[in-house]
Amino acid sequence: MVAGDSTPEPDLNAAFERVMTLMAIPGTSGDEGRVVEYLRKQLRQAGAATAAARIDDVHLRTPLGGKVGNLIFTLPGTIRGPRRLLMAHTDTVPLCVGSKPKRSGEFVQSGDPATGLGADDRAGCAVVLTAALEILSRKLSHPPLVFFWPVQEEVGLFGAHFARLAALGKPKLAFNWDGGPADKLTIGATGAFRIAIEIEGLASHAGGAPEHGVSAVAVAGLAIADLQRAGWLGDVRRGDLHGTSNIGVIQGGAATNVVTDLVTLKAECRSHDPGFRREILTAIEQAFQRAAGAVRNVSGATGKVHISSRLDYEAFRLDDGTPCVLAAEAAVRAVGGEPLRAITNGGLDANWLSARGIPTVTLGCGQRNVHTVNEQLDLAAFRQACRIALRLATGTEQQDGP
């Protein structure tokens, strides 16, 4: 803390120990119980009332199900001001199970070369937890606060999507910590459809009577080739319109001597433009229906295609003068950084909170190369994120820092 600045420096050594512990805890989407329990235990040990740190029932209402709900910790304000929400998701992708965080200089990477690190988003969890613990242990003044650790972000932003808004206390400023450098402010993100495709063919002996079968594999291959040729897969552009699509999972078949009668696929399409996103979805649906009609057996029989889709998250973009954006920028500057506004083609919990009436800006906390075995945590950026979060939690983002 410097003269004229009432915001203390957070205990960064303790924050480092927390993030190292959190990254080592297994907790994929739907199985975040050990992570949530660690967070809640830390809050209680710092003096949080049991009733103030509660786990909701969101896992009973999401498409995935799961074993545990969101963790929500509320603090009445000690000073007047609009309620603020600080959040970070608790789950990691399966690649991070078995992470063995190992520090090398100013970076951390998994000591197991076969796993990711899990800094996405355990670094965010540690940043938000550090702000809460600093306030509790030092009895710092603060406006009304909600600390929110949602589950199931990686599989569709379910924790944020299905959280009961009343439990979040109608915050006026909301801040989410996820990937990237500490001075990056993500103020907008794309929207996405998740698509499930089932192809029913007709089985037959592949050696004795292949002409009587209808290959579901052939239908899938024809549709995919059609989409690729027409430019509806990958980076999709039509004039000024832009989106992306991907077929990420294909499953089917059990033997080479059987004409495959069932193939399932999982796909997605994204765009910041809702109309163009729907156009990409329609192109995918039509390609598979055409392919189903084109693959026939000797009797003229065809297969069937069943396609279902759901909106994973809607696109959003915060206005330039949105209070949470201006507050976040002030906090970044107060710790010596220069804020950079960004738009992402990924989905964030901020998509659903913003869509549900809580404008939310996302800040980074040092994660690099997420969802890969080369994932790293930049400790300098992580420390800056801890400083920024404490300023935003205490409402002191306008004060000059070092």
Image (cartoon, grey):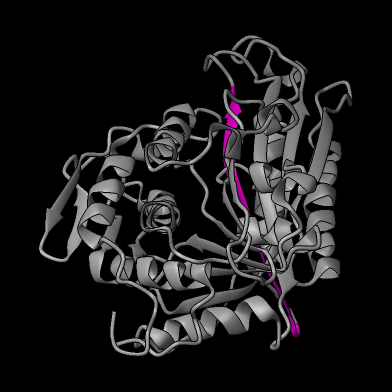
User: Percent from the top left, x then y, of residue 24?
Assistant: 28, 38
- In the rendered view, does 358 fall on the left or right side of 39? right
> Which range of residues does the magenta coloring cover?
239-252
User: Percent from the top left, x then y, of residue 13?
Assistant: 20, 57
Q: Residue lying farthest left?
A: 105
Report the magenta stretch's main SS: strand
Determine whether 208 is above or below 287 in the image: above
Residue drawn at x 67%, y 42% is 158
- Whether residue 332 is visible to the viewer of this picture, yes or no, is yes
In the rendered image, residue 250 lying in the magenta stretch gets the answer: yes
In the rendered image, residue 211 lying in the magenta stretch gets the answer: no
Where, by quadrant of the figure, is residue 180 drawn? bottom left
- Whether residue 232 is visible to the viewer of this picture, yes or no, is no
Q: Quadrant of the C terminus?
A: bottom left
Q: Nearer the viewer, residue 65 or 167?
A: 167
Where, by quadrant of the figure, is residue 16 drawn? bottom left
Q: Nearer the viewer, residue 387 or 381?
A: 387
Residue drawn at x 16%, y 66% is 106
Q: Residue lying farthest right?
A: 300
User: Percent from the top left, x then y, of residue 4?
Assistant: 36, 90
Residue drawn at x 49%, y 78% is 396
Q: How many marks?
A: 0
Q: Quadrant of the N terminus?
A: bottom left
Where, by quadrant of the figure, is residue 380 drawn? bottom left
